[in-house]
Amino acid sequence: MYQVDLPPDPKEVAAIEARRNQEKERQSRFFNVRTRVMGVDVEALNNQVEERKLQEATERSKEAAYGTNQVRYDLVAQMLEKEQAERTRRLAKKVQNFREQRQKLRNRCELDFWNSNQLWREFPAYLGDNAPYYGQASLQCFSGEDLERATYLRMQQEQFQYSLERQLQEQQQARVDENCADMLNDQLRLAMDMRAAQLAKLEESCRTAMMAATASANKAQAVKLAEQQRQEHQRQQEANLVEVQNQITSDLLTENPQVAQNPVAPHRVLPYCWKGMTPEQRATIRKVQETQHHEKEAQRQAEQALDAKWESQAINLAQAQRLEEQERLCAEFRRGLGSFNQQLAMEQKAQQNYLNSIIYTNQPTAQYHLQFNTNSR
């Protein structure tokens, strides 16, 4: 078969890589000096607790600042709601005043559908020719017969003057109300600005205090972190020295074969502690190998002798078969040759008979031969 470079299987490659990573992780756990010698890192746990407390204090300060901002926003929202309510109240009051002054019941012109006796009250029974409820169409008062024209004119002038005074009063009252509203709005804005300034100053002080606390906490944490790093470096150096001492004095770097013996299965060894075989084991293995080599050589010679025997027997059998085949062929050849000679003799005999019986019936005499020779001369 031809060897073809096939691409590797992605699943197989991924499985091999996963097993390799698991083995590296297992070796990192086994060969970690701190975990194997010192156990749990209490200092790291204490550092995590301190960092957690510092984070909680920072979160509480942030929540306090957020609460201050929320209070300020609530005050501003309440002020805006009050201003909106006051504006709505003033608008409703103006509408009510307009309705009371301009939309009185006696001044309306539309018909009240809910009062069926309205026309009877507006037009009572006949009171006289000078009754104001009857016009020219009633045939009770005609043009040129208005006897109370002066009174009507005076009443119209008084009503017009009264309307003008009311309009002036309303305009003055509107200006006064507008001025009051503007003054109230100015006072409200001023109060809101003062309150916003106070809240901004309070927020700035809180931010400054928070920044100072954060800076001091960061500085303390930096100093503490530097001290921890120094202690960690010193602890690492000591651990390295202890590890070197342990490696030098332990059985890991020695040639003690008992270290590699598996306590569960004595016939097996520990691969990560095995230092090689002893001279006795190597000698035993060499002796077993020599014995196997001799046995293999004897087996090979026996197989060669058996093969030679089978080969000679096959050669003899082939020679016997070849001789038998040659004899069979010779016999067949002799039988074929005899049959062919017999057929040939029969054909010659038949031809001779044909010649003797048909062709050579007249035998020439000596006189014929003599005459033939004369003519030929």
Image: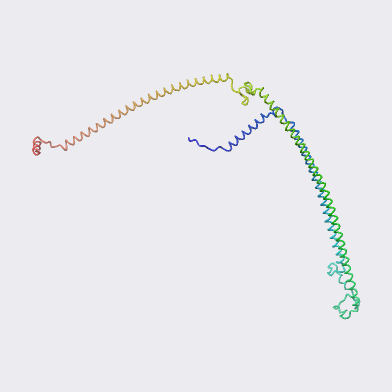
Position above or below: 85 against 147: above
| Of the pair 266 and 44, the residue shown nearer to us | 44
Indicate the colouring scheme. rainbow
In the rendered image, residue 263, in percent from the top left (x then y), is placed at 65, 23
Position above or below: 268 against 19: above
Identify the image quadrant of residue 324.
top left
The answer to whether 355 appears left or right of 11 in the picture is left
In the rendered image, residue 156, in percent from the top left (x then y), is placed at 89, 73
Identify the image quadrant of residue 369.
top left
In the rendered image, residue 168, in percent from the top left (x then y), is placed at 88, 67
The answer to whether 180 appears left or right of 369 in the picture is right
In the rendered image, residue 187, in percent from the top left (x then y), is placed at 86, 55
| Of the pair 65 and 40, the residue shown nearer to us | 65
Which image quadrant: the C terminus? top left
The answer to whether 158 appears left or right of 23 in the picture is right
The answer to whether 264 appears left or right of 317 in the picture is right
Position above or below: 177 against 212: below
